Amino acid sequence: MDKKKATPLHRRDLLKDAAAVSLAGAVASLGMLANAQENVSVAQDAAKIQQPASRSSLIRDENAKPGARDWQLTRVRLDKAGGVRSSPIEGYCSKQSVMAAETVNFKVSTAAPQKFKIEIFRTGYYGGRGARLMTTLGPFDGTPQAVPPIGEKRIRECQWESCTTLTIPEDWPSGVYLGRLTTESDASGHGYWQNYLIFIVRDDRPADILLQCSDNTWQAYNQWPDHESLYTHPDGVQGPWADVSFDRPYGKYSQIFENPQTIGSGEWLCFEFPMAYWLEQHGYDVTYCSNSDMLTPERGLKCKAFISNGHDEYWDIRQYESVVKMRDEGVNLLFLSGNSVCWVTPFRESSAGDPNRIIFRGGPYGGDYRWAQEREKNFGPYPHHGPDEGYLMGVRNLRPVNGGGDWICTRPDHWIFADTGMKQGEAIPGLIGWEFHGDPPTDLAGLEVIAEGTALNGGVNPAPWASTIYPGPKGNFVFNASTIWWCQGLASPPGHWLPWSHWSRPHGPDERVQQITHNLLRRALG
């Protein structure tokens, strides 16, 4: 998946055929292929670029530690063909994010009484291996835990017993952590089964870069246990009718590709991990947070740059207000994402009283923008309405928002393209998708369109997209890449597969995307 080489179609076909009963063989062979390809890095030249002096060597020191050779899922099984649930073993965490010295509970169910262990890995670069083993917990006695009935607004809210409580060690750095659940072989000797659970370790130190995980969007699309998400309500896919809870496992991701590494890991390995892998590869001083950690601006105000990554669709209005405050106080904003700030998504507490554990699609961002009004007419009425996101991001969500295309340079003289060699009209193939932004506000002072073109939905229906940059009030800037797939051009780490959708796909790591991102970060970090 490196060297700008197209992903062979037979890999996806192979895995799709295997997904019905057991994906074990496909996972093992494809995981080895991904690791082998990762050893050949297209980022060798970019790695020589002199980086700004970081506030801390924490990330460089962490990545000097040995990575794990075995951290991916090897043996997984779906309950049924076309399903999302893997009930032999599955689990979730009691919190989206946790700080050192705080506790997180792990809630795990096994289909039959059976012992299991939990290996905790921090994802990062680690010499190209992609993760480090932090600790192993167990063995524990696994038992079946009840699938909750469908509740009001079709919510599925588990109330599982905890198998263990983990106090985060003081020396665990901020990052995205995977708990790999592995059963012991059953009594008949049929082997073990695996799944993930996922949580974020955050901190409050001053750092150069704050990377926000798009976990609200992971949960919005999560269909566990069987077709229950914000997109599966009988009344329609865009209305405010459904609630979803973080108190449930992540099922297999149900769009774009058939990727068994998504079981239990949300959308992290699909659409976001390449960004973290690449940042840590180059020693950037990065710290991590959940969407739910951005309800006030204090965390972001301690950082020089804020990155929205991947598919960042669902924002509580307090997140929006926090990021506006950060921009106005001089933090550089990098929307290396698509379909971002699309829906107002209020948090509320769980039935047990735990904060920020339930979300729903409260209404559109967009203010008086025409597509926001169209959504209100077609799918409302909504109880919430957000401001025009174009005045924060520089571009808006428009209709159609789905499609794919090439990312086309229109301002080769701009500093963002320094040392890329890009020329007017030069394209980075397949980088736009599968959702994007466009229609920049014409009255936003200093805004420049640095790339633009047309995306096609299903290879047919055209929609304009635009990538923009505009100055903030204190010498800072706001950049919008206008694509979910930006980080696909940075790296293709172990555990990650290239996605495809709407008859288009990114081609993988590209030295121009890498150089543009270096240019943005060098400017942001001074």
Image (cartoon, grey):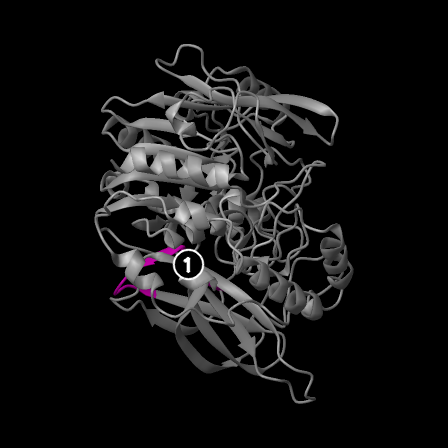
**Residue in front for this viewpoint, 3 or 240:** 3
Look at the image and give the residue range highlighted in magenta.
90-103
Compared across the picture, whether 108 is left or right of 459 comes to left
Residue farthest to the top, as pictured = 443
Compared across the picture, whether 234 is left or right of 282 comes to right
Q: 239 above or below 153?
A: above
Q: 465 above or below 184?
A: above
> Where is mark 1, residue-wise?
124
Q: 460 above or below 212?
A: above
Camera sees residue 465: no
The spot of residue 395 in percent (x, y) is 47, 22
Q: Secondary structure at mark 1?
A: loop
The spot of residue 3 in percent (x, y) is 58, 48
Q: Amino acid at mark 1?
A: Gly
Q: Residue at x 47, y 64 (%)?
A: 129
Compared across the picture, whether 222 is left or right of 198 comes to right
